[in-house]
Image: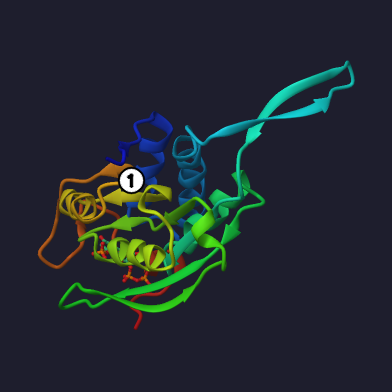
Amino acid sequence: MGKYVVLQQPLLTHKLTIIRDKKTDNATFRRVVDEITELMVYEVTRDLPLEDVALETPIGKTVQPKLAGKEPVIVPVLRAGLGMLNGFLHMLPNAEVGYIGMSRNEETLEAHEYFVRVPQDIAERKCFIVDPMLATGGSIIDAIGALIKRGVPENAIRVASIVAAPDGVKAVQAKYPDVDLYVAVEDEKLMPNGYIYPGLGDAGDRLNGTVKSD
Ligand code: PRP
Ligand code: URA
């Protein structure tokens, strides 16, 4: 069974309040999403495996741990996931990047995949799918499905979302029980129109400065 971690930390909570506020301007919204992401990376990478390497400090020879295996792949779900990409790359600067484009139909709330471009050897790497909003869970479920179709094992996938709805979390866990899921907060509920309450509105529009987009 994969992990489900709701990060609880006063700085995170404070920053969430800033991005929830509809009066927060685009520049501040983008900057604070980036800051929240950096705080999340600390938790999301907490148990990554290490391997010993031999090296010499200025004082003498030693064996010390470093991250094991190939560099991971950060997979932002377009568009809003792009807002979390830099936060991950600040902490994992040599990570590879793959992209999955998903758009949610505003009436049916079903996700539609419109773009996938990921490293060829992605099946051999740990993958971090990033998307600030996990509402019905449909976009994340399809993004996980796109990686599994390309050979990535379920237990090599971690999802990082800033705000999650309880129904969406349950849907992802039911479909992919071995995927690890990290969220900054689980909000009260999903509204009938598919928005998370209290949430922060449309993350893609707020990150991109668009009012409504097709
Ligand atoms: C938003 C958000 C998630 C999705 C979450 O994307 O960024 O990807 O909705 O909803 P779900 O869990 O019900 O699938 P949207 O489709 O609005 O596209 P955008 O990021 O381009 O704005
Ligand atoms: N997508 C968003 O951007 N916000 C929501 O509240 C739900 C889905």
172 to the left or right of 27: left
Q: Nearer the viewer, residue 62 or 139?
A: 62
Horizontal side of 70 relative to 144 (left or right) equals right
Q: Is residue 17 above or below residue 9?
A: below
Q: Determine the image quadrant of residue 153.
A: bottom left
Q: Where residue 154 sits in the image (x, y, percent)? A: 36, 53
Characterize the local packing of mark 1: few (<14), some (14-19) or many (20 or more) Cα atoms within 10 angstroms: many
Q: Quadrant of residue 115?
A: bottom left
Q: Residue at 35% x, 44% y: name it.
A: 180
- Residue 64 in percent (x, y) is at 70, 24
Instruction: Residue lying at the far bottom in this picture: please name it.
Output: 214
Position in image of residue 38 (x %, y %)? 52, 43
Residue type, mark 1 in image: Leu
Asked if residue 27 shows in the view, the reply is: no
- Screen quadrant of the C terminus: bottom left
Ligand 1, image quadrant it occupies: bottom left
Q: Residue at x 15, y 77 (%)?
A: 108
Q: Which residue is identified by label 1? A: 181
Q: Is residue 184 left or right of residue 166?
A: right
Secondary structure type for disc 1: strand
Of 27 and 111, the residue lying toward us: 111
The one nearer the camera, 32 or 40, is 40
Q: Is residue 128 above or below residue 75?
A: above
Residue 50 shows in this picture: yes
